[in-house]
Image: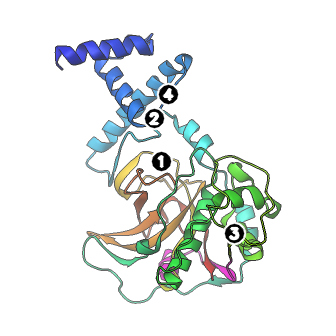
Amino acid sequence: MTTFKVVIALTLASIVGLTFAHVTAEQALRFESWASAHGKQYEEKDRDSRLEVFLKNMQMVHEHNMDPTQTYQMELNQFADLTAEEFAAQYLTSINPIEEDEARLTAAFEFNDPITGDFKLSADNYAVDWTKYQSPVKNQRSCGSCWAFAVNGAIEAYYRRASNMTDTPDLSEQELVDCSRSYGNKGCSGGNMVRTLRWVKDNGVHLEADYPYRARDQSCPKFGPNLVQYHISSYGTVARNEDTLASAVRLHGPVIISMDAHRLSMYKSGIFSGCSSNYDRNHGVVIVGYGTSGNTPIWKIRNSWGSNWGENGYFRMVRGKNMCGVQDSASFPVL
């Protein structure tokens, strides 16, 4: 490090108000650079604790990325100043499996047609990929509204595909957050994707332009009668089997799932395989494709943490091992 950089780093360390001797000037400089890049601003009393968390996460990311057995890379992204517990409280939800099972019973049908034949393609190709029909990846921010983004993300894609991209709706997640509580959803504290599909079937959903996203709970407004609404005629669930799930993606289109995302926060790229067999479904996402990467079967999944997260807002995950509970609660809209 040059003398100039040392002076800057020591000055930054003084500004941060570090009270622990083990933090180096270079670490302080890295934290300040990261905070600036991600628009992070802290009150003076919080800076030291955020730096401590950042440094622990930096060590974790370094150790993970240096491990040759890992199938994916991590990075210090927008979540790098949060502990695992803080991340879960702000961005994940608690999904009740009993409530999910009850909601599944309201579906018009359960898709149960396992995939047949050999749909593997050459390395790094997808046997099915609906990404071109996806709207731009959105950011739920610190509101447990992943369920709303997953449902709208799927519905938007189905309309885009059905119209051959002549109808490209951007639907209101805030409306689902604020207006579907009577169906058992809890706004920023979580929701159920199948219940939300039923709500859209019964009520329709307006455009984002008419009710923008605020990332907080609000009262459901009264909408004018002339505003555009998008509806679905029905919705289906998918039998709990990954071959059947792949078949649903191939024959119907993007499929909404719940999964365990505790270890997903600082994913950068590669094939995610970070869940143990003791998983807890807490996040709603959309499967947009499947295929192989090398010899590894994979899912391609759309997230709702912004386009700067992961692989342009998406991630790949191991297929065929029920990784993170991917097969346990899947559903899709029918236009």
Where residue 39 is drawn, which disc sits there?
2
Residue bearing mark 1 = 263
Q: Are marks 3 and 4 in contact (CB under 8 Å)?
A: no
Residue bearing mark 4 = 41
Q: Residue at x 56, y 71 (%)?
A: 169
Q: Are marks 4 and 2 in contact (CB under 8 Å)?
A: yes
Identity, as a three-letter code, of the amino acid under mark 4: Gln
Residue bearing mark 3 = 205
Residue 299 visible in image: yes
- Whether residue 272 is in magenta: the answer is no
Q: Disc 4 versus disc 2: distance between alpha carbons? A: 6 Å
Identity, as a three-letter code, of the amino acid under mark 2: Gly
Q: Disc 2 versus disc 3: distance between alpha carbons? A: 32 Å
The magenta segment: 231-250
Residue 9 occupies which quadrant of the picture?
A: top left
Q: Disc 2 versus disc 1: distance between alpha carbons? A: 23 Å
Q: Is residue 53 left or right of residue 181?
A: left
Secondary structure type for disc 4 = loop
Q: Disc 1 versus disc 4: distance between alpha carbons? A: 25 Å
Residues packed near mark 1 inside 10 Å, few (<14), some (14 to 19) or many (20 plus): some
- Sequence-wise, the earlier of marks 3 and 4 is 4
